[in-house]
């Protein structure tokens, strides 16, 4: 019997704030993945990445921190984005990370992804639509269902003071996203 392969998920948060609710979603996803057979999630910190400036590319090489990030992207089977909504769109740090990894050769290409978000109003939903548009150009394949947005400010409390997800129903919904991402990743890897 062949050994089960482990799906390697790279988790990327568009917020740099320590107690970010979106970071809390990723921490919860990592915790949930420990009980999801065949899946492991690694959080990738995008805060050290310099703002995209092609002057930093010297002799076809990227700055070491950028190259290390690109290698982590290459090693992942799929991606889980936590995308807060700033001014109806994705955040500058997230767009910057996407742009660095899309520089030639584009290391995002032809892999699956999922997006989750927390915030006010629509719970970050508008940022998800913009991220999906960017994904078209960089050749990411987002799962369609289930969608995950959460209004972080409606009672009852969804997060604690440190930004950790405490809502049991939201955790169940988050687990459904992970299972869908895993299934979609396996399907794409098998060419179906």
Image (cartoon, rainbow, N blue to C red):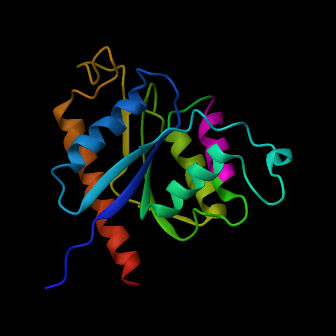
Q: Quadrant of the N terminus?
A: bottom left
Tell me the residue at 34%/22% (across/down): 163
In the depicted structure, whether residue 69 falls above or below residue 166: below
Percent across and percent down for residue 31 are 23, 41
In the depicted structure, whether residue 11 falls above or below residue 166: below
Indicate left or right for 184 with 81 as reference.
left
Tell me the residue at 54%/40% (across/down): 126
Q: Is residue 183 visible?
A: yes
Percent across and percent down for residue 52 are 75, 43
Indicate left or right for 117 with 96 as reference.
left
Question: What residue span does the magenta drawing correspond to?
Answer: 87-100
Tell me the residue at 63%/52% (across/down): 67
Q: Quadrant of the C terminus?
A: bottom left
Q: Is residue 90 visible?
A: no
Main SS, magenta region, reads helix
Indicate left or right for 20 with 30 as reference.
right
Can you tell which quarter of the image residue 30 is in? top left
């Amino acid at each position: 019997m062949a050994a089960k392969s482990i799906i390697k998920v790279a988790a990327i948060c568009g917020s740099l704030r320590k107690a970010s609710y979106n970071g809390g979603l990723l921490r919860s996803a990592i915790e949930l993945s420990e009980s999801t057979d065949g899946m492991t999630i690694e959080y990738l910190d995008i805060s050290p990445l310099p703002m995209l400036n092609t002057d930093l590319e010297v002799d076809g090489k990227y700055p070491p921190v950028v190259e290390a990030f690109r290698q982590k992207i290459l090693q992942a089977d799929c991606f889980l984005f936590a995308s807060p909504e700033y001014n109806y769109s994705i955040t500058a740090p997230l767009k910057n990370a996407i742009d660095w990894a899309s520089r030639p050769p584009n290391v995002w290409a032809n892999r699956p992804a999922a997006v989750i978000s927390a915030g006010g109003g629509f719970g970050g939903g508008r940022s998800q639509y913009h991220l999906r548009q960017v994904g078209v150009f960089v050749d990411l394949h987002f799962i369609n269902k289930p969608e995950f947005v959460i209004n972080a400010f409606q009672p009852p409390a969804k997060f604690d003071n440190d930004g950790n997800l405490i809502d049991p129903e939201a955790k169940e919904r988050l687990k459904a996203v992970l299972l869908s991402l895993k299934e979609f990743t396996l399907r794409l890897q098998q060419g179906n």
